[in-house]
Image (tube, rainbow, N blue to C red):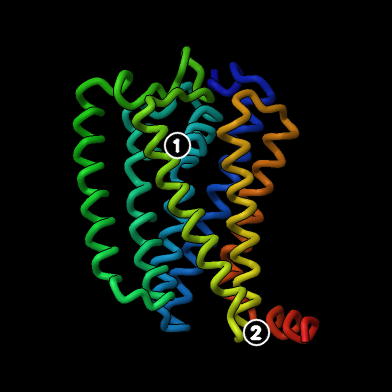
Amino acid sequence: MAYIENLGYFDVLRLSLGLIFTIISMIIGIIMILKYFSLNRSNLILVGITWIGLAFPYVPDAINLLLITFSDFFLPEQIYLIITISILPIPLCCWLVAISDILYFQKQKIVAIISISISIIFEIVFFSLLFLDYEYFIGDPYTNGKIVVQTYSPFIQIYFLTCLGLFVLTGLIFGFQAVKSSDAEIKLKGKFLLGAFILLLFALAIEVIIEDPSPSIVIARSIMRSVSALLFYLGFILPNTMKKRLLKHNS
């Protein structure tokens, strides 16, 4: 018997929306990376990796949904935690380096060295604690035996908030800088980026503040995340037809 039959409608809904967001983010990230070859903009590789990496906390749930649909098997707890937590430093480093490059920050190498060094230290600590006593130091991905309920230690909660906070804060700063540009195209892209980061901020706030959300809240949160992914893409790669129409409309 497939494990999914043991889940309620709401649990399946949450897992399904996570799968949808994961697929959308992967597609957008891959497209951005591939655009490097036609546009020859190296920062597209970094921002593409960034958005793919930000989706990784939702990847285990997406994998579990596929597994439990056809079997009674789901990801082992340690594998779940590794995918959810250990990947985040990579997109954060890519994002900080990309932003430094785009904004012509003179100390780009220092930003790269510091962010990579901190990430390496975190990974060493994380994997040490993971194999020492993950339930105490890291968290329980299947709280009370439920695959849709996760409980994380204060250490990991602070880590999540720091990573996502840095990403959203630097993204908002970047968006505001772009909006103030005298170049109409850059200003337009800045508006898309601001929209992306504001929506993402709201989605993250809802996820953190509301511990037991209703189905409508979960759906709204998922829509915010998905729309923010699309706006993030348009903030870096704006199709010519859309660009011409929007610039003409604003002129």
Using the image as rendered, state which of residue 239 and residue 118 is in the foreground: 118
Up/down of 103 relative to 112, above or below: below
Left-right relation of 242 to 2: right
In this view, the mark in front (1 or 2): 2
In this image, 211 relative to 249: left or right?
A: left
Compared with 78, 99 (above or below) is below
State the quadrant of the N terminus: top right
Return the x and y of residue 100 as percentages of the image width and height: 37, 70
Question: Are the residues at dot 1 and dot 2 in contact (C-beta closer than 8 Å)?
Answer: no
Give the residue drawn at x 61%, y 63%: 194
* Residue nearest the viewer, comparing 179 with 77: 179
**In the image, 78: left or right of 157?**
left
Q: Residues within 10 Å of mark 1 (few under 14, many from 20)?
A: many
Q: Secondary structure at mark 1?
A: helix
Amino acid at pointer 2: Ala
Q: Find the distance from the CA under tag 1 to the CA under tag 2.
A: 41 Å
**In the rendered image, which quarter is residue 189 located in?**
bottom right
Query: Up-down: is 80 above or below 90?
Result: above
Which label is found at residue 231? none
Could you say where residue 208 lies in the image, as x and y percent from the top left?
56, 33
- Spot occupied by residue 172 in the image (x, y as percentages of width and height): 54, 60
Residue 101 spot, x, y in % from top left: 37, 74
Residue occupied by mark 1: 60
Amino acid type indicated by mark 1: Pro
- Specify whether 107 is left or right of 44: left
Residue at 40% across, 61% down: 95
Instruction: Name which residue lies at 65% across and 84% down.
Output: 184
> Which is nearer the N-term, disc 1 or disc 2?
1
Q: Residue at x 60, y 71 (%)?
A: 190
Per the image, the residue denoted by label 2 is: 184
Task: Describe the element under mark 2 as helix, strand or loop.
Answer: helix
Image quarter where the C terminus lies is bottom right
